[in-house]
Amino acid sequence: MDFTFSEEQQAAAEAARGVFAGVAPDAVPSPSLTAGAVAEDFDRALWARLSDADLLSLLAAPEHGGAGLDAIALCLVLREAAKVLARVPLLEHSAAMAAVQAHGGPELRSALLPAAGRGEVVLTVAANGRTGHDPAELAVTARREADAWILDGVQTAVPWAYGADVVLVPARTPADLTVLAAVPRRHEGVALAEQISTTGERLAELRLDSARLAARDVVEAEGAWEWLRDLLTTGTCALALGLGERVLRMTSEYTGKREQFGFPVATFQAVAMQAADRFIDLRAMEATLWQAAWRIASGAPGTLPASGDVAVAKIWAGEGVRRVVQTAQHLHGGFGADVDYPLHRYHAWAKHLELSLGPAAAHEEALGDLLAAHPLA
């Protein structure tokens, strides 16, 4: 495999750096100082800038107004987004577009993709199941009735749901197959109940009560949900990497200026060793991320399915980002707990990313099952 980025992928990353250059993580109120969510909606101004830079349509094909790039390009952009804690549904929106393009019918593609690529229609994904601990595809049932589908069930912790126009929902059929339903947020039989995440962002419990959708709004392709879940998980790893890199840089800058006994604390062996360990964590997170993204982008065969590489990446991302922010808090001392300094927000986002789409232990179990089903020669 070749992890050298193409000119187009590097251009996407460069455009993202330009868009996110003016975003200040400490400009958002601390969740600990607010009664509810940090904001009612995501950052619409930043969303508009991402649209102007054509970063919302990275994965869409040219016939739908997109750049026709791949999961690697998306992960490069997400990496930059996480460095500033960008409050936009970039991962969920992009992944939902990619799933519709890869597996949806022509009517659904033409209805959603051009408008979504321009940012006029916002997409998100319900991926956390009924409780956050059970498979998402089992939380909602879907049954066919003439030329429509009827959906019933509950999905918890749907990100950015109050700002989205369409939620892509996995659902189980009586034939034990998983479909993906494009559910409008404002639709008969659809209700939201507010939830607040660790980050202070507004989530929603999505309740479906005999919600009726046209057949064209349901993706019946086999493996569509598993592919989307792998892409979402890999994107979460990219967010964890970008966040961890920014936190380590903040720690380096702080320990280089903070003095004890007349010397910068960065020169102390114990400090340097901890920072070096976290640097190694980040490099492992990076290597496993690009392996997973490459498998998804290329569709290349391997000894294990691509979900095996995704599991390895999420194990490293979850454990690695947790260690990075914990070390950063330790090396910042009391200053790290100051809510006027943004480190506490990075810590909250890191915990959210660590647990999103399953903690490391869940992916270790999934990897064990894959290894048992595909014994290595």
Image (spheres, rainbow, N blue to C red):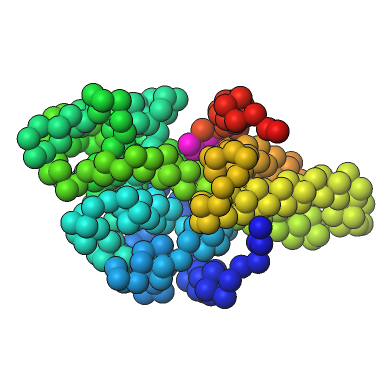
**How many marks can you see?**
0
Please tell me whether residue 205 belongs to the stretch shown in magenta: no
User: Residue 112's image quarter?
Assistant: bottom left
Instruction: Answer whether residue 69 is visible to the viewer in this image.
Output: yes
Report the residue at 59% width, 38% height from top.
304
Report the residue at 55% width, 40% height from top.
305
| Residue 14 position in % (x across, y down) | 55, 73
Report the residue at 62% width, 40% height from top.
303
**In screen coordinates, is 253 left or right of 19?**
right
Vertical arrangement, residue 176 with respect to residue 17, above or below: above
**Quadrant where the C terminus is found in the figure:** top right
Pick the front one: 345 or 318: 318
| Residue 373 position in % (x across, y down) | 57, 26
Q: Which residues are magenta?
A: 353-357
| Residue 301 position in % (x across, y down) | 56, 47
Instruction: Answer whether residue 36 is visible to the viewer in this image.
Output: no
**In screen coordinates, is 247 left or right of 8?**
right
Pick the front one: 40 or 203: 203
Report the residue at 23% width, 24% height from top.
174
User: Residue 67's image quarter?
Assistant: bottom left
**In screen coordinates, is 108 left or right of 308?**
left
Pick the front one: 105 or 265: 105
Pick the front one: 40 or 128: 128
Question: Farthest left residue?
Answer: 146
**Quadrant where the N terminus is found in the figure:** bottom right
**In screen coordinates, is 54 left or right of 349?**
left
Give the prevailing secondary structure in the magenta stretch.
helix
| Residue 264 position in % (x across, y down) | 86, 57
User: Residue 61's image quarter?
Assistant: bottom left
